[in-house]
Image (cartoon, rainbow, N blue to C red):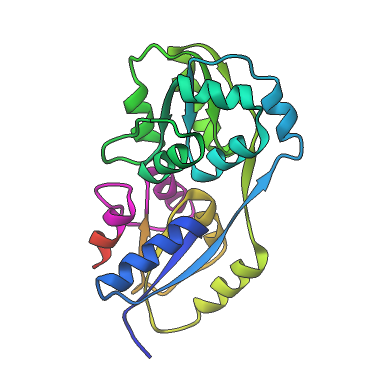
Amino acid sequence: MSTHKWVIIGTSNTVKRIVELCARVGIEADGYPLVVARENPDIREELRRLGYVDTCVFTSRRAVELVYQNSSEDFKSNIRRCAVYTIGPSTTRRVHELFNAESTHPNVDYSSTGLVKLLTGRILGRTALFSSVKRSEILVDALRMYSQVLYEPKLYDLGVDSQVASRFIESLENSYIRGLVFTCSTAATIMGGTSVDSSIRIVAMGPRTLATLSALGYNSLIPTHSTVEGVVKLIV
């Protein structure tokens, strides 16, 4: 059995992309997509309350999909006409695919921090933030500074799939693990009350994840850029 295998833990899309890129550059990696989206059952009502907006901010592909699936045709037209900002290129592509709308994302820092920097100083007008509940809490203070009105419809929150989490915890008993990569802070919370061998390297994809792991007593590495490519460049 290989002694050089990395384990990637987080949301399904990001885990999948990191594992695939690892394979292309010759890194062995297993994925544990243990972070799941728990949708607000009243999402249609949340979106129905929105009036006309000047700016939309999307922080994930899932947020784009939920807005598309649950909003009116009038609001979809509004999105095509307004200024749209996203957290990264994957989310930008999804906005284009579903809404046929153009959007802007940070150049390299695909994180809440990068998004705040992108929006700093802009006049956003009436703004809708489409995000997980957890990430919304990080962004709202910054967005309020530049928005005339800020809408925060509750779309979904992030939780942990207990079955996948159990398989991941069991995998920590194996001696072949070279390192762990956590793609988000929700994934990192699984390490509470868990210990790993000191030889195992731990990587946090972004600053919030780094802070979560630090609070749990883990020293972590962080890539120069919070991207799939940045992670793989760090662990190669």
Up-down: is 147 above or below 16?
above
Residue 73, percent across and down? 63, 27
Residue 11 visible? The answer is no
Locate residue 192: give its quadrant: bottom right
Residue 170 visible? The answer is yes
Residue 134, percent across and down? 57, 38
Residue span colored magenta: 205-231
Residue 169, percent across and down? 56, 72
Q: In this view, does 51 lie to the left or right of 98?
A: right
Residue sitting at 76 percent across and 40 percent down?
Answer: 41
Total count of labels: 0
Q: Is residue 154 left or right of residue 2?
A: right
Residue 215 located within the stretch drawn in magenta:
yes
Residue 212, percent across and down? 47, 48
Observer-nearest of 2 and 104: 104
Observer-nearest of 119 and 7: 119
Up-down: is 112 above or below 80?
below
